[in-house]
Amino acid sequence: MDPPKVDPIDSHVTRRKMSTEHCSKVLIAMDGSDHSNYAFDWYMDRLHRKGNNVVVAHCPDYSAIYHTPGISGDASLIAEILREEAVKMEIIIDKLRERLTKTGVPGRILRLTGKPGSSLVKAAEEEEVDYVVTGTRGLGKVSRAILGSVSDYIVHHSHVPVFVCQKPKEESHHQV
């Protein structure tokens, strides 16, 4: 018995339909830096499909404030710095919202608190995303060990695939 004949045109259409039928939910970690903007653009250029649902997650890192000598013991100075950071965070959130609107991507902004790495991993689990996209500063092993790396933490603790996007040195994207 001969195998059924497959019309190459119908086969192509079926393949294309199948690839767009599965919509993904993705978490993009963004902190307003050039590196996170590059990750967003990378996602849009390479992974985004119509129907995907995007959760843009922002988690400010305040750890340096509490561990800087001279600042850590001054409650009023810490309060002032946190107020300034809250204003900066609102600006970043507004720009992220504008970015989603401009690209026409269905999604929302998620504000997180706590340590960025663990907060982002927890958000990915709670939001039941299919994968995470994050940027990286491209730190060496020593710098990563001393300063810590959010992307490194996400890669090692996430229960879903993680795309880590390193911005090429010659790229110059504007900050959110």
Image: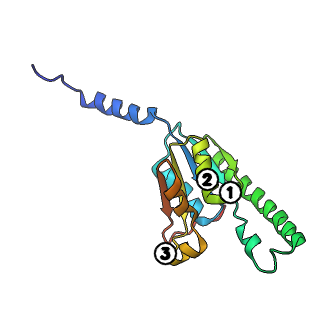
Q: Which amino acid does label 2 sit on?
A: Leu
Q: Determine whether, in the image, residue 23 is placed left or right of residue 32.
A: left
The furthest residue to the front: 73
Element carrying mark 3: helix
Element carrying mark 1: loop
Q: Which amino acid does label 1 sit on?
A: Cys
- Residue 34 position, x and y percent, is 60, 65
Q: Residue 120 carries which label?
A: 2
Task: Depth check: give the residue in front, 93 or 174.
Answer: 93
- At label 2, counting other C-alpha atoms closer than 10 Å, the crowd grade (few under 14, some 14-19, many 20 or more) is many
- Residue 134 position, x and y percent, is 54, 57
Label 2 or label 3, whichever comes before in sequence order = 2
- At label 3, counting other C-alpha atoms closer than 10 Å, the crowd grade (few under 14, some 14-19, many 20 or more) is few
Which residue does the numbered mark 1 point to in the structure image? 59
| Residue drawn at the location 49% of the way across and 41% of the way down | 49
| Residue drawn at the location 54% of the way across and 73% of the way down | 145
Q: In front: mark 1 or mark 3? A: 3
Q: Can residue 105 be seen in this view?
A: no
Query: What separation in Å lies between label 2 and label 3 (alpha carbons)?
Result: 22 Å
Vertical arrangement, residue 131 with respect to residue 32, above or below: above
Query: Looking at the image, do the residues carrying marks 2 and 1 touch, with CB atoms under 8 Å apart?
Result: yes
The furthest residue to the bottom: 70
Give residue 10's quadrant in the image: top left
| Residue drawn at the location 50% of the way across and 39% of the way down | 24
- At label 1, counting other C-alpha atoms closer than 10 Å, the crowd grade (few under 14, some 14-19, many 20 or more) is some
Q: Is residue 118 visible?
A: yes
Query: What separation in Å lies between label 2 and label 1 (alpha carbons)?
Result: 8 Å
Element carrying mark 2: helix
Give residue 153's quadrant in the image: bottom right
- Residue 90 position, x and y percent, is 77, 56
Which residue does the numbered mark 3 point to in the structure image? 141
| Residue drawn at the location 55% of the way across and 76% of the way down | 143
